[in-house]
Image (cartoon, rainbow, N blue to C red):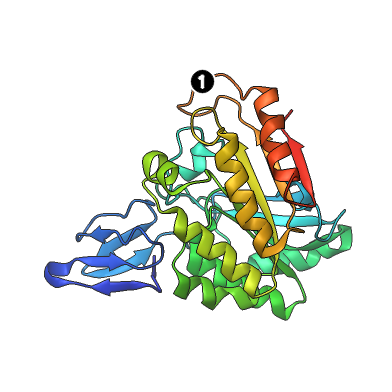
């Protein structure tokens, strides 16, 4: 275990995690919502000092269509997530506590990434589960990667506090943010999270001129309202209409059994995006 970077000590050996906006109050011997932060003796530790997944992927799989096209990227992830989506496609990693069986240090990951440059590897992607929950490991790896002229890519739900995001922004070159719904009400109802925090994450990434692409998995009953999508893409276009947008079809996974998204609904959401944004792609069809 490694001591966490963002937490506040409280009375009776309790701690408040300050990594994401959930601000979990964690009693001694317990974990936070993400299952990766553990209170031991009144201090907060991360169990993500190893990995649960590692692979070499095309960068387009992240998906990033407008950044380092045609390159490969060494992709890593660790167990846990600060969301618990019932349609998660990587639930065997994201909805588990401490299943990090790949014992690699940040130095070893960077060494492997450098070796893989010979076959087109551009850098390291923090992905598969939610990289926010492996924050300390990710930041240490990203700093080392920059010294080797490797790029760093973060594939995230964007639910992170401003302080840790600002601290890691200098080392991350590109983001794909998974926008799971288009309104505050939908985020509160389905994810017990605040949409305004996601919007603030997007604003900070844009302000720092980092490459950004948006993914939207269109799930029936959660984010398939065209008028809500129109409002979001209008807001996003006001920031930068050249941000690539990926509109993807949901299929049943994990606990979700509703049928796959109707293709006509998917097209309507994509049309709403194309009305405002310059680059829109449909996926999973």
Question: 194 or 271, which is in the foreground?
Answer: 271
Where in the figure is residue 284, as x and y percent of width and height? 71, 32
Q: Is residue 133 visible?
A: no
In terms of image quadrants, where is residue 75? bottom right
Q: Quadrant of residue 242?
A: bottom right
- Count of marks, rendered view: 1
**Residue ID at (36%, 46%):** 192
Q: Residue at x 65, y 75 (%)?
A: 208
* Image position, residue 247 (x, y; %): 69, 40
Query: 249 or 109, which is in the foreground?
Result: 249
Image quarter of the N terminus: bottom left
Relative to 103, say whether 258 is above or below: above
Residue found at x 72% / y 57%: 74
- Identify the residue shown where x is 85% and y is 56%: 69
> How many residues crowd mark 1 within 10 Å: few (<14), some (14–19), many (20+)?
some
Image position, residue 111 (x, y; %): 71, 69
In this picture, residue 12 sits left or right of residue 115: left
Between 121 and 180, the one lying in front of the other is: 180
Q: Tell me where residue 117 appears, x and y as whole percent.
A: 83, 64
| Residue at the limit of the structure toward the left, as seen here | 12
- Judge left or right: residue 142 versus residue 96: right
Quarter of the image for the C terminus: give it: top right
Which type of secondary structure does the marked residue at label 1 adopt?
loop
Residue, disc 1:
258
Q: Is residue 239 above or below residue 130?
A: below
Left or right of residue 10, residue 255 in this image: right
Can residue 22 be seen here? yes
The answer to which quarter of the image holds residue 84 is top left
* Residue 132 versus residue 168 in the image, above or below: above
């Amino acid at each position: 275990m490694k001591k966490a970077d963002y937490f506040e000590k409280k009375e009776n050996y309790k701690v408040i995690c300050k990594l994401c906006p959930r601000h979990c109050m964690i009693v001694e011997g317990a974990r936070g919502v993400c299952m990766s932060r553990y209170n031991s003796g009144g201090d907060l530790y991360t169990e993500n000092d190893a990995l649960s997944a590692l692979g070499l992927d095309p960068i387009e799989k992240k998906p990033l269509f407008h950044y380092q096209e045609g390159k490969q990227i060494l992709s890593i992830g660790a167990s846990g997530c600060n969301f618990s989506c019932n349609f998660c496609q990587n639930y065997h990693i994201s909805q588990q506590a401490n299943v990090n069986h790949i014992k690699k240090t940040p130095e070893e990951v960077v060494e492997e990434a450098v070796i893989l440059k010979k076959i087109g590897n551009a850098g390291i992607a923090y992905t598969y589960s939610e990289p926010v929950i492996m924050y300390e490991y990710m930041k240490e790896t990203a700093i080392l990667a920059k010294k080797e002229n490797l790029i760093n890519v973060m594939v995230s739900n964007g639910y992170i506090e401003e302080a840790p995001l600002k601290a890691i922004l200098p080392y991350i070159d590109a983001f794909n943010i998974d926008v799971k719904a288009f309104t505050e009400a939908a985020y509160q109802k389905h994810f017990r999270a605040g949409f305004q925090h996601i919007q603030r994450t997007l604003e900070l990434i844009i302000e720092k001129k980092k490459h950004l692409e948006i993914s939207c998995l269109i799930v029936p009953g959660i984010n398939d309202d065209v008028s809500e999508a129109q409002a979001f893409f209008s807001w996003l276009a006001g920031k930068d209409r050249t941000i690539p947008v990926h509109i993807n079809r949901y299929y049943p996974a994990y606990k979700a059994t509703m049928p796959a998204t109707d293709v006509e609904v998917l097209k309507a959401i994509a049309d709403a995006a194309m009305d405002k944004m310059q680059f829109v792609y449909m996926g999973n069809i």
